[in-house]
Amino acid sequence: MTNDLAYLVNDNSWSKRHYEGVQLDFGYRPGRWNFGGGWTIAKLTGNDTTESDLTASSPIQVPTLYYPEYLGYANFAPSGYLYGDQRHRGKIWGGYDVPTPLGRLNVSVIQNADSGRAYSAIGTIDASGTNANFRYVGAPTKPSYYTLGQLGTSHNYYFSKRGAFRTPWVTATDLALNYELPISRAALFVQGQVLNIFNQSKVNNIVLGQLDTAVITSRSAGLASGLKPFNPFTDTPVECPRGAAASVCSQMGANWQKAPTFGQGLSKDAYQTPRTYRAAVGVRF
C-alpha cells in the first residue's frame, strides 16, 4: 500500500486558496486473481477562485482595495469550500485470468465512487446603490474617486456559506472482457466493455453552467419579482421559498429566492455517462 500527501497554499494577502489531500493505493495478485484500487481524500478551501471554466485566469477585484466602501461587505467573497472541492474519489477492481486452450482471457469488474462537488448560492446585487430600482437604505456616500463605469451596478453576494451545497455521490460499475492471442511477435486482441452497467444517473458535471445555481434577486429579476433590495453591510437577507409567487415574496419582505431548478442539471451533459457498450479489435506489435 502506498500513500501520497499533497499540500498547497496560495496566499497573496487577500486571495487565499488551500488544498490538502492524501492518496491511498493497493494491489494484490493471488494466483489468477488481480485486485487493486485507490482512494483520494482531499479538501480545497479559500476565498477566491481566479480560474474560470476553460480559462487560465480571470480578474480579481480585491474588496479591501477596490471601492471598499461598496464591496467590503463580508459576503462579497467569503472563505469556505471552493467550487472544485471534492472530498472523496475512489475505485476498486478485481480481475480473473480465465484458463483457455488458446490465448489469454481476462474478466474484470471496476467499481467507481465519487463524492459530491461543492457549489454555492450566489446572486447579484447592486452594491453601488445608484439605481433607484435597486437602491438600499444606508448606501455609502460617493467617494471623490467614484466612477460608476469602473464600479458597475452588478456585484456578487453569497446568500449561503461558500460551498454550502453538494451534488450527490456518484457510483458506477464497469465490466471488461479482454482476450489476447499471441501470433509470433504480435498479438491479436479483442476488448469488450460495459460502462455503468446499472445505468446510474446522477449529476456529476458542474462546469460550463451544467448545474443550475441561479439565485433570483431584485437586481437580476427586477422589482416585479417581489424581492427587495437590502444593505449588504448591515442586513441579513430574507429568503423567499423556492417557487413561491412574487406576492408571497413581497409580503415576506424577502430579498432572494433560489431558482425553481436550483441544484439540478440543465442538460444531459450534467449527468454521468449512461450505460455504454464499447468494443475494440486490433493487433499489438
Image (cartoon, rainbow, N blue to C red):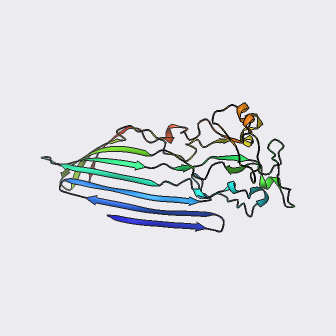
Q: Nearer the viewer, residue 43 or 93?
A: 43
Q: Residue at image x 76%, y 46%?
A: 230
Instruction: Indicate the quadrant where residue 64 lies.
Output: bottom right
- Is residue 104 in sight in this rendering? no
Is residue 187 toward the left or the right of residue 101 in the image? right
Q: Nearer the viewer, residue 258 or 208?
A: 258
Is residue 44 toward the left or the right of residue 242 in the image? left
Is residue 242 toward the left or the right of residue 90 in the image? right
Residue sitting at the far left? 101
Report x, y in % for residue 273: 43, 41
Q: Is residue 284 above or below residue 8?
A: above
Report x, y in % for residue 15: 64, 63
Q: Residue at image x 76%, y 60%?
A: 68
Instruction: Indicate the quadrant where residue 70 lies.
Output: bottom right
Q: Residue at image x 56%, y 41%?
A: 263
Q: Residue at image x 72%, y 60%?
A: 63
